[in-house]
Amino acid sequence: MATVKKSYPFYFGGTASCVAAMVVHPFDLTKVRLQTTKGNAKLGMFSTMIKIAKNEGFFKLYAGLSASILRQATYSTVRFGGYEKLKDFVTATTHRKASLGELLICSSIAGALGGACGNPGDVVNVRMQNDGQLPPQQRRNYKHAIDGIIRISKEEGVSALFRGIGPNISRAILVTSSQCVSYDMFKAILLKHTPIEEGISLHLLSSVLAGLVATTVCSPVDVIKTRVMSATNSADPSSKLSATAIMKQMFKTEGVASFFKGWTPAFIRLGPQTIITFVALERFKLWYDMFQDRKLNNNTTTTNTTSTKVAVQQI
């Protein structure tokens, strides 16, 4: 008899990502600051964090947290939920586990949808994180994510909320494919070829490896996306350049290494974020299974009690 694959609520992935975002936000902010630093500055991750805390205050490391949570609530909910639903659809249609190629197609579709849905939150997130290093007259000073969305819509037009949507969708496809698919692959390989069993150890190791793959694959697109989104329509000349033009300019003036600016904080952010996201997601699934089993047991007990009462009355 075939095992029926369980289906979980669509929002689990987004909720797990929001939990992770609250923990790793300072690293995400540092990554954005490094990526938007133009030229050949040699600032490292920790020196940048110390500089931010010293010059702007410790809590500036959490600038844009509301936008980060909004982004995860839209972007990650759609990409994780979409990936799981598409994967379930393939399994139900073919009556077997999805192949690597099928998983890549599922993750690409889910990633593209997630990138598009999360773009407004991502624009506000990048701007709020980058605000502190701008001259005072160029700072936006958004109060929170919703204020940022409203002000951008009024001051620059709704289309500004979708700045960088091309590289953002490309990055979302790469992140979802490299993160989710590699996590599934590493988890299957470790279960099959090592003594590690289902549990926290398996989830930790699989997610660390997935985070390493995702960071390396996504770094170039992430840098370009950050540069496009951090520009405004008036103050920054680069705002008139396309993603392709910015990429050519970076290669010409800063070299290949510029595409990997912020790799260390990106990995230190994406590593823990991937770990926390997948561990939280696995916990949510476990708790959901326990809740459903308890509910089923209660229903069974109620049914048996009712049947016993009916039988006694008939006697």
Image (spheres, rainbow, N blue to C red):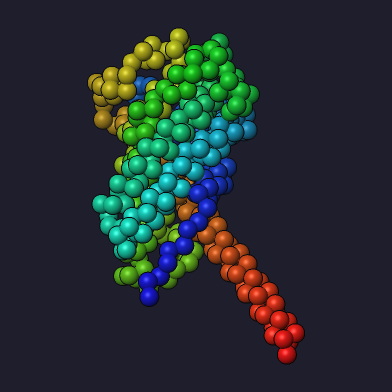
x 59%, y 33%: residue = 66
Q: Residue furthest bottom?
A: 315
x 37%, y 62%: residue = 187
x 50%, y 24%: residue = 127
> Which sits in the foreground, 86 or 207?
86
Q: Is residue 149 above or below residue 205?
A: above
Q: Is residue 26 above or below residue 298?
A: above
Quick check: can you spot residue 265? no
Q: Is residue 57 above or below residue 152?
A: below
> Which sits in the foreground, 310 or 65?
310
Quick check: can you spot residue 146? yes
x 70%, y 77%: residue = 306
Q: Residue furthest right?
A: 313
* Residue 53 appears left or right of 233: right
Which image quadrant: the N terminus?
Answer: bottom left
Q: Where in the figure is residue 145, as x and y percent of width and height?
A: 58, 28
Q: Residue furthest front?
A: 314
Q: Where in the figure is residue 114, as x and y percent of width and height?
A: 43, 38
Q: How many marks?
A: 0
* Residue 46 appears left or right of 182: right
* Residue 18 appears left or right of 185: right
Which image quadrant: the C terminus?
Answer: bottom right
Q: Quadrant of residue 301?
A: bottom right
* Residue 217 appears left or right of 159: left
Q: Where in the figure is residue 299, as x and y percent of width and height?
A: 64, 71
